[in-house]
Image (tube, helix red, strand yellow):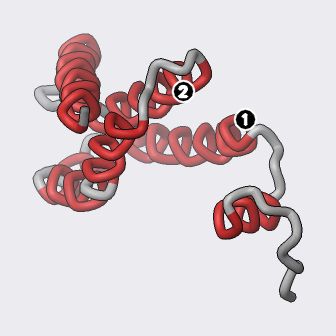
Amino acid sequence: MVIYGVALLSICLLTGVFLGDLLGTILGIDANVGGVGIAMLMLILLAEYLKKKDKLKAPTQEGLSFWSAMYIPIVIAMSAQQNVAAALDGGPLALTAGVAAVLISWAIVPILSKGGKADETLENEMTGGNQRVRNIR
């Protein structure tokens, strides 16, 4: 059911926000540190795990697809609440954390994509896996 996809997303979001608040407390910062990012990674990893185990049915994936489209506005809204000027005044820790997050993200992309070629993935999505369609370039 679609509601199971929404439930999975909300569990990941609540867990991510909790862990982000906990991380902020540990670091001595009175803010959520990466809660939405943690939630997104949890959702991606959990959804892939459930797909491999054939536990994530099509209606459940529909619920996930709807809310995954909502992630960008959610992230923008949450980042708008952050005080960037205060973070930069806090010292080099904010810049170091930002650079580290970007570098780690770049390093994780090939792992998450499993080295597949973008052309093959796009072609398979467009043709439904039908290999008889010519590659248009």
Q: Quadrant of residue 9?
A: top left
Residue 118, percent across and down? 76, 62
State the residue in front, 128 or 35: 128
- Looking at the image, which residue is at 55% across and 48% down? 102
The disc at residue 73 is none
Question: Eyeballing the image, is 7 above or below 28?
Answer: below
- Looking at the image, which residue is at 17% across and 23% down? 14
Residue at the farthest bottom position = 137
Residue at mark 1: 111
Question: Eyeballing the image, is 15 above or below 104?
Answer: above
Quarter of the image that includes the N terminus: top left
Residue 48, percent across and down? 54, 28
The answer to whether any part of residue 17 appears in the image is no
The answer to whether any part of residue 52 appears in the image is yes
Question: Eyeballing the image, is 137 above or below 115?
Answer: below
Residue 2, percent across and down? 24, 38
